Image (tube, grey):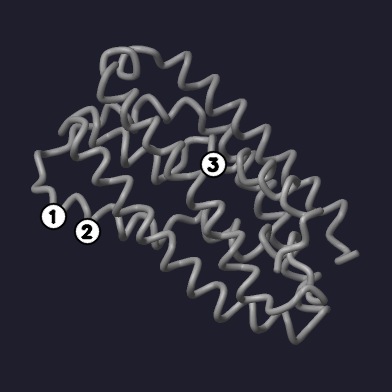
Amino acid sequence: MVPVSALLPFIAAALVIIIVPGPGVLFTIGRALTLGRRAALLSVLGHSAGVYLALILVAIGVGTLLAASALALTVVKFAGALYLMYLGIQAIRERKTLHAALGAPVEPTPHTRVLRQSAVVGLTNPKAIVFFSAVLPHFVDPAAGSMPVQFLILGTIFLAMAIVSDSTWALLAASARSWFAQSPRRLEAVGGAGGTMILGVGASVALTGSGD
């Protein structure tokens, strides 16, 4: 079982990661802007399936490794913290590219292809992979039981939150296409604030990354 004391901090950290637009959100919004609401929601489902597969792979591989080595757990935490800080800095520096990415034309695509493409985006989503392999271990307790099982429980909570957030993005984008396409300053503000929050999460993980 996952320690109850770790759930609220985990949910807070997950929320910060989820609400910042990343590859999955940009892909979903792109589908909403060009193909409409149904394709956008299908993208959310496909992306979630890909992310869950990534979670299973991390839980089996990384979870087992970390359960066997306290040193590996500490190394992964610090590596993840540094990489999150890097992602935060990159998000701040590249916040102006969000508008260009959302405005890029996308050819009409069959729904089956939307599902397939979004699953690949989810499976290779660097933000999700970093969170599962580097941040998530910070919230598991080797003394509380199987680490792979704890990975799956926490990862499922993360994914459920992400589905709600991504679906909201999809519905908003489908309902307000012109607002997203013509508001570069708003998108830049979202990117800048999101990068700052990711940077903060990375710093927090680094400062408490000793495994205590």
Q: Residue at x 59, y 63 (%)?
A: 153
Q: Nearer the viewer, residue 137 or 34?
A: 137
Q: Residue 121, position in %: x, y? A: 35, 55
Mark 1 falls on what kind of element?
Answer: helix
- Number of residues whose C-alpha sits closer than 10 Å to that of mark 3, classed few (under 14), some (14–19) or many (20 or more): many
Residue type beneath disc 1: Thr
> What residue did someone put label 1 on?
112
Q: Is residue 59 left or right of residue 81?
A: left
Q: How many marks?
A: 3
Cα separation between marks 1 and 3: 25 Å
> What residue did someone put label 2 on?
116
Quarter of the figure with the C terminus: bottom right
Q: Does label 1 or label 3 sit earlier along the sequence?
A: 3
Cα separation between marks 3 and 2: 22 Å
Q: Is residue 126 above or below residue 167?
A: below
Q: Residue at x 69, y 41 (%)?
A: 12
Which numbered marker is on residue 18?
Answer: 3
User: Which picture quadrant has residue 108?
Assistant: top left
Q: Is residue 139 left or right of residue 83?
A: right
Quarter of the figure with the N terminus: bottom right
Mark 2 falls on what kind of element?
Answer: helix
